[in-house]
Amino acid sequence: MSERNLSKLTSLRDDIPAKLMRVVRLAWPAIKAARQKGHTLKVIHSRLAENGIVISYRLLTCYVSRLRREDRSKNGPSAPSRGKPFRESKESASETGESGRDPLANIRERLVLNRPGFHFDDGLPDHDKLIGKKDE
């Protein structure tokens, strides 16, 4: 192949993609660095507009949060970034034998141990508690 046949292909390297998410993904390292320096997303949005990348602020925030989640999932699970961390009871951790939290332990305990309504016992009856028991 000659270089002339690849000129259109190599020109794609310098073109801006048509999809906005791809544009934001290309600019993500610069956006992340600006955020770490303390710049707001409003300022970053205005700079993108100055450079000819027309995107609504709301869509930019959506894309940035999506890219943050992707970065977090690549780096592995971590503690929640907002609010108080989940407090685990010592009993539930020792019962499951795991140090990880079980978000359904509360519901599972209520459904199994404290079921409302009638509980049928299919075992053999206790003869001492039967009514009308004849003494022999």
Image: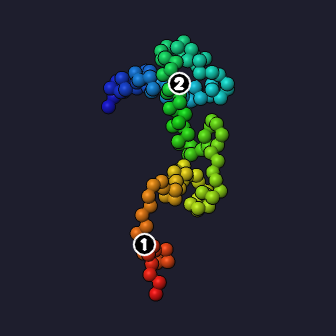
Name the secondary structure under disc 2.
helix
Between 132 and 123, the one lying in front of the other is 132
Q: Which mark is residue 123?
A: 1
Q: Nearer the viewer, residue 136 or 128?
A: 136
Residue 94 at x, y = what percent?
A: 62, 61
Query: Which residue type carries mark 2?
Result: Thr
Question: Residue 18 appears in which quarter of the rendering?
Answer: top left
User: Residue 91's mark?
Assistant: none
How many residues crowd mark 2 within 10 Å: few (<14), some (14–19), many (20+)? Answer: some
Q: Nearer the viewer, residue 110 or 106?
A: 110
Q: Quadrant of residue 34?
A: top right
Residue type of the residue flagged with mark 1: Gly
Q: Position of residue 58 (x, y in %)?
A: 50, 20
| Colour pattern of the rendering | rainbow
In the rendered image, which quarter is residue 1 located in?
Answer: top left
Q: Disc 1 to disc 2, how far (Cα)? A: 61 Å
Residue denoted by label 2? 61
- Which residue reaches farthest right? 37
